[in-house]
Image (cartoon, helix red, strand yellow):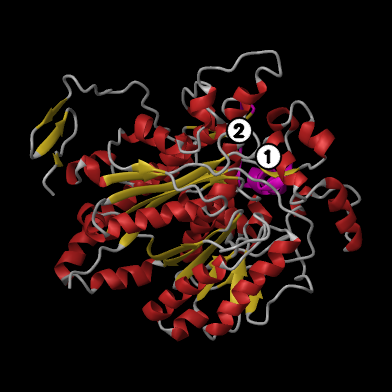
Amino acid sequence: MTKKPIPVITSFGGVNAAGRSSDHIGYQNTVFDSLSKEDQTKVLKDLAVMQGLIKASGNSWSKDSEKIENLNDFLNQNSDQIRLNTMVRKLNRELYDPDGIILDQIKASAGGQLPTGFDPGSFYSSRQHARALQMTIFGMSDTLGQFGIKWSEIEEKVSPDQIAVFSGSAMGNLDHFGLGGMMQSRIKGSRSSSKNLAFGLIGMSADFINAYMLGNVGRTGHAAGACATFLFNLQLGKEIIENGTSRVVIVGSAEAPITPEIYDGFFAVSGLSDDKRMVALQSQLKEKEKEPNQTKACRPFGDNIGMVLGESAQFIILMDEDLALEIGAEIYGSVPTVASHADGFKSSISGPGIGNYITLAKCVASANKILGSKTLQEQTFIHAHGTGTPANRTSESHILDKVAKAFGIKKWPVSALKSFLGHSMAVAGGDQLISALGTWDKGVIPRIHSIQKTAEDVYDDNLAILINDKVEKPNFFKAAFLNAKGFGGNNASALILGPDVTLSQIKKRLTNKAFKDYEKKLEKTRKSIKAYNENASKGNYKTIYKFNHEVLEGIDDLEITQEKIKLKGYKKEIDLES
């Protein structure tokens, strides 16, 4: 029997409240206290550059045009402020709420905003693009930089119809450059722009990647599934690589939900962590702050009051292992199982149901077969959906605990990134995946920083819900589970295998010579990745935006026969007989 291709992760990138995703910068910001001094300084430098606090000029650095004599001293002295400008924090009124609806009427002041001072639209001609689309351009450029291989090499190896892109939002792009502007315009006495409607569509992130970055003519789409959207897209990508219809798949999501309308919607369903309840909870827990402490607004699995919204754009490049080996791509992990299931009959469209038990159990059963029970029980961990609502802490903890018990897991490490990042809606699973890749690199699973203990109604007999970072050696953990639960019964879970397990599987299919040939090509790729990240750490992000670039028309730019289609400018032909 022919073995199915292995869908391997060959690059990752993006941006969220913790920083840029490439080089594991954002992930390292969430485990900062567990890093070496050298790594801490590296993270601080990257964040300070993003925030515009420092600027590189050759080998020297400056702040406000004044030379910094000792960069490390400057970063260490300003460490707290640099990091306070990231992750969940008080909303920037000027940027997100100029009319004061969120801050003054709804009175919910916390959000997982991109680092202070960082404007993703400033690195290219953003032309009134909705914020999530600006983040798409930056995040996908970051992914291509981390890839370390020119996209033209993919085009030389793969037919145009064997490349796919799945990316988008859950809520739609609702800021004033998207659907928000279209719906608000008449009320505010103006007219909608010609761009508002198109730029607001939920699948526009994939469209921008196709049209302005890759020139992709292959499969495109977006599987919207509320907060499980990224994992729905991941499932699509995994399946079309395994069935051979695509060899390369961009999987991603981009969401910018910090808008008055979305805050108002979550406030209406009592799902939001607002200031009044935040202060009351702080008093109940005998915390010293008398004003809202926005950094602890989201408290997954602890005594909590609601969720916090966050913005994010995350992308990975999946491909079959044969292509990855042929081009010398870095292999960061693989995706053997993604499961998505509905809840069946429901009493409330926003309430939890039965589907997530099924999705998680399927992924854990798959890991049990691949890794064996001992490794499953001792060297895996889970990124919980962990929204920070009272309903989630009981329903999801019961799911995790019940599945753990069924498979003999006694102390399953559980992280919940929304305490750092807020809830990025469609991208939530992408935030988890990027963090899991970082854990294999550094060996650290992020804690839930906003709680001191779990709430009394949390089910945790078989769980180790992390109040402190879980620190092991790099690649100690062999697999990670990602979990997502969305309104309407959109449930998804994924099993992600680490790089060493993935490579051991691949080696079984290769001769020693073939693997050594791959390792030789990999050396060149790693040099290119290192060069990209060194440049990015100085603010040279190499953002890709190809507007009006080599646009093809049907009249003169292609040839069609019964056997093939030949497109002008594309190296490979499309085979109509396969």
- The one nearer the camera, 237 or 354, is 354
Q: Position of residue 97 (x, y in %)?
A: 73, 31
Residue at (47, 56) in percent of width and height: 231
Residue position marked by numbered label 2 in the rendering: 174
Q: Is residue 503 left or right of residue 110?
A: left
Extreme residue in the left direction: 562
Q: Is 38 above or below relative to 214?
A: below
- The one nearer the camera, 481 or 54, is 481
How crowded is the residue under tag 1: few (<14 C-alpha within 10 Å), some, or many (20+)? Answer: some
- The one nearer the camera, 248 or 394, is 394
Query: What amino acid does circle 2 point to?
Result: Leu
Upstream in sequence: badge 2 or badge 1 = 2
The verdict on residue 69 being magenta is yes
Query: Quick check: can you spot residue 563?
Result: yes
Marks 2 & 1, CB-CB < 8 Å contact? yes
Q: Position of residue 265 (x, y in %)?
A: 71, 42
Query: Quick check: can you spot residue 468?
Result: no
Q: Is residue 243 left or right of residue 386?
A: left
Q: Is 1 above or below relative to 335?
A: below
Residue at (54, 58) in percent of width and height: 432
Query: What amino acid does circle 1 point to?
Result: Ile
The verdict on residue 247 being magenta is no
Q: Position of residue 555 (x, y in %)?
A: 18, 19
Residue at (24, 38) in percent of width and height: 152
Q: Position of residue 253 (x, y in %)?
A: 49, 45
Disc 2 from disc 1: Cα separation:
8 Å
How crowded is the residue under tag 2: few (<14 C-alpha within 10 Å), some, or many (20+)? Answer: many
Stretch in magenta: 64-90
- Disc 2 is placed on an element classified as loop
Residue position marked by numbered label 1 in the rendering: 262
Q: Quadrant of the N terminus?
A: bottom left
